[in-house]
Image (cartoon, rainbow, N blue to C red):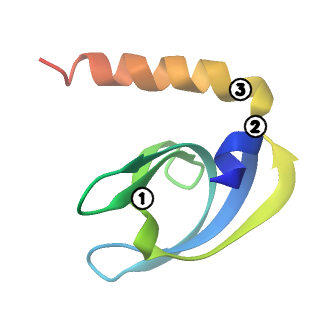
Amino acid sequence: REACWAELVLTIRYRDLRNRTTEREIWPLGISYSAGAVKLLAWCCLRDDWRVFHVAGIEAAESVGRSFRPRRVALLHGYAGSRDGRMS
């Protein structure tokens, strides 16, 4: 949550729902809370695309000491634009 607010780049170790582990650099943009899960919306530098991570699958997270702030607004516009075709 702090990294989202401060717009800090993170390195994470993530275990997906198929039990595969990867290490990746992400730019966290938002957290969603529901009855069944807490999820993190982030730009994934490994995949060069948007990803939604289950927070429970994040085994480790560390700030790399730099900000993605100059790109935040463009990223959010890009995410909204990528969702437009999926909403219908």
- Residue 85's x, y, as percent? 22, 18
Q: Residues within 10 Å of mark 2 (few under 14, many from 20)?
A: some
Query: Residue 68 — which label?
Result: 2
Q: How crowded is mark 1: few (under 14 residues within 10 Å), some or many (20 or more)?
A: many
Q: In this view, does 15 lie above or below 43?
A: below
Q: Is residue 64 left or right of residue 85?
A: right
Q: Can residue 33 be seen in this view?
A: yes
Alpha carbon of mark 1 to alpha carbon of mark 3: how far?
A: 20 Å
- Residue 25's x, y, as percent? 65, 58
Q: Name the residue under label 1.
A: 53
> Label 3 sits on what residue type?
Arg
Label 3 SS: helix
Q: What residue sits 71% from the left and 26% below the top?
A: 71
Q: Is residue 48 left or right of residue 10?
A: left
Q: In this view, does 50 lie above or below 63?
A: above
Q: Can residue 7 be seen in this view?
A: no
> Label 1 sits on what residue type?
Phe
Q: In this view, does 10 lie above or below 74?
A: below
Q: What residue sits 51% from the left and 17% below the top?
A: 77
Query: Residue 71 — which label?
Result: 3
> Label 2 sits on what residue type?
Phe
Return the residue found at the far left. Answer: 88
Q: Disc 1 or 3, which lies upstream in sequence?
A: 1
Q: Residues within 10 Å of mark 3 (few under 14, many from 20)?
A: few
